[in-house]
Image (cartoon, coloured by chain):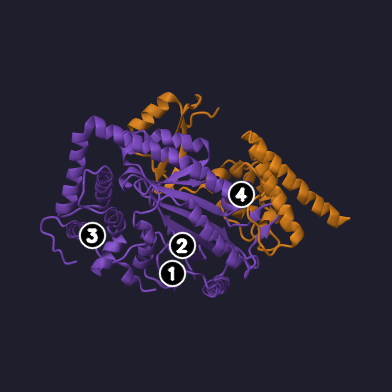
Chain colours: A purple, B orange
Amino acid sequence: MDLESLTHTSGEWLRGSGPDSDIVISSRIRLARNLAQYPFLSRADDSVRGETSDLLRGTIEDLGLPRRLSYVNVGGLVDLDRQFLVERQLISREHAESRGSRGVCVSDEENVSLMINEEDHLRIQVLRSGFSLDECWDEINRIDDALESRVTYAFSENLGYLTACPTNVGTGIRVSVMLHLPALVLTKEIQKVFQALQKISLAVRGLYGEGSQAMGDFYQISNQITLGKSEEQLIESIRDVVPNIIAYERRVRNALVKENRQSLHDQVSRAYGILQNAQTISSEETMQLLSSVRMGINLELIDDLKMSTVNELFIHTQPAHLQKLRKEDLESAERNVARARYLRQRLGGNGSEMQN
Amino acid sequence: MKKCHRCSKPATLHITEIREGVVQELHLCESCAQDYLENTDSPEPSEDFDPIHEKLSEYEVDEELAELDQNECPNCGITFREFRSQGRLGCPHDYVAFEHELMPLLENIHGEVQHCGKFPKRAPDASQRQYQLIKLRNELRGAVEQENYEEAARLRDEIQTIENELNAEQT
């Protein structure tokens, strides 16, 4: 896979379509699997790592899945390229930062990725735009079935799929939905959502891991329990709760528009204006302003910008993406200048070069 | 009732803090929570948070555990102590070798210790149906809890059919 060609595109999951995509950015399911005949990676030396990665890569490429997959040798990449894959959500941060032989098989649309030698021998991930957990499950289940007919997974009758960390044992499934909740954050109602989710054992995380609010009001809701419930039940636990959060966010947005339309319109327009005109801008500020703009599009306060563009900008203004676009290593201050220039270009603001 | 993390009063506010992409749960009483929420700009430094370490830290090293700590998996050679410090097991056999130590941990993390999801298609036919039974019984429990008696009756019939089949094969 040619990473350079990816810099100008974005994954299908960012296109901003699918059910409830005004609030649900993406749905994701991942499965953790290990090969029965090898130790887990914490006890695997280089030769074992080499064997598991060769075996899994060969098996995956041989599956004849309907989607074309390309293999990326993550262990052989420079740091910037690894960071680039993390920003695109194709590999995890742990996978980027670990050591030794490892790789990832990625589908052309970037909807499917199979991480080899992550914390477990294999982590399968399927992503979809919008609120589409059933589609994710159908696809990942098929991939898992196909693999299972060719390799022997570590599995026990009582404990299910055996994983390196006991927090994943059983189904090995993590079901998550990425939500954009600017109105709940603005009104501080988000705390109530956290409390409610905690009571039913669901976890809340940010977009990549940086601080919560600074990262564009994105929240990932996922299951914590993996043992003692079936995959369908765990998916249902997320599927049941998300519509309530969506309805809550929509209600608060409508209330904001109704009670305070002018000041909301002002905030959104200022955010848009800064993004179109800034000469230097940090990643945090960009995320925060893009979040306002994104909400503005949903509330029809901005009408000349596509949702897919804003979704893409959240990813393309991340540090590794900017450096790949500029084809050079940049210090933080240089990145802020490059980011502002890129935003002016994409948003057609003053002094834009309009090259594309 | 959980106690406040900062004083010993009962915790009435349960805060989920997200930092560096990891979620940390805080249980605080009214006054500590007030104090905490007002001072969120100067957060306490948080080390790399990993949920397994939080669970493991609940296991005080008493004498009994010190002994268990020496247990070693005959397959991969990891000791339970090593697992406790790194939070990752060494091989699939650890779940057998450390069964006694791991069960309470699994119960604590998941609230259950019996898998009832997907199972490998290549498992022998008889054990496939065992898994099926486990799954159906679990669904039955859920149906009863939700007072969905129609579904419960259907599940009960299905369970009965599989049990009969298995019994018939055994005799």
Where disc 1 sits, the SS reads helix
Instruction: Classify residue A306 by image quadrant.
Output: bottom left
Which residue is identified by label 3? A335
The number of discs equals 4
Q: Are marks 1 and 2 on the same chain?
A: yes
Find residue A230 and name its label: 4
Q: Which residue is labeled 1 in the image?
A: A74
Asked if marks 4 and 1 touch (Cβ < 8 Å), the reply is no
Image coords of residue A88 (percent x, y): 37, 60
Horizontal arrangement in the rendering, residue A153 relative to residue B170 (left or right): left
Pick whichever, A232 or A271, lies toward us.
A232
Whichever of callouts 2 and 3 sits on the residue coming sooner in the sequence is 2
The residue located at (61%, 35%) in the rendering is B146
- Label 4, label 2: how many angstroms apart (C-alpha)? 27 Å
Label 1, residues with CA under 10 Å away: few <14, some 14-19, many ≥20: many
Q: Are dots 1 and 3 on a single chain?
A: yes
Point out the image quarter for the N terminus of chain B.
top right
What x and y, as percent, mark residue A154? 64, 62
Q: Earlier in the sequence, mark 1 or mark 3?
A: 1
Image quadrant occupied by the C terminus of chain B:
bottom right
Q: Is residue B64 among what the camera can see?
A: no
Relative to A249, residue A65 above or below? below
SS at circle 2: helix
- Give the residue type that dot 2 points to: His
Q: Amino acid at mark 4?
A: Ser
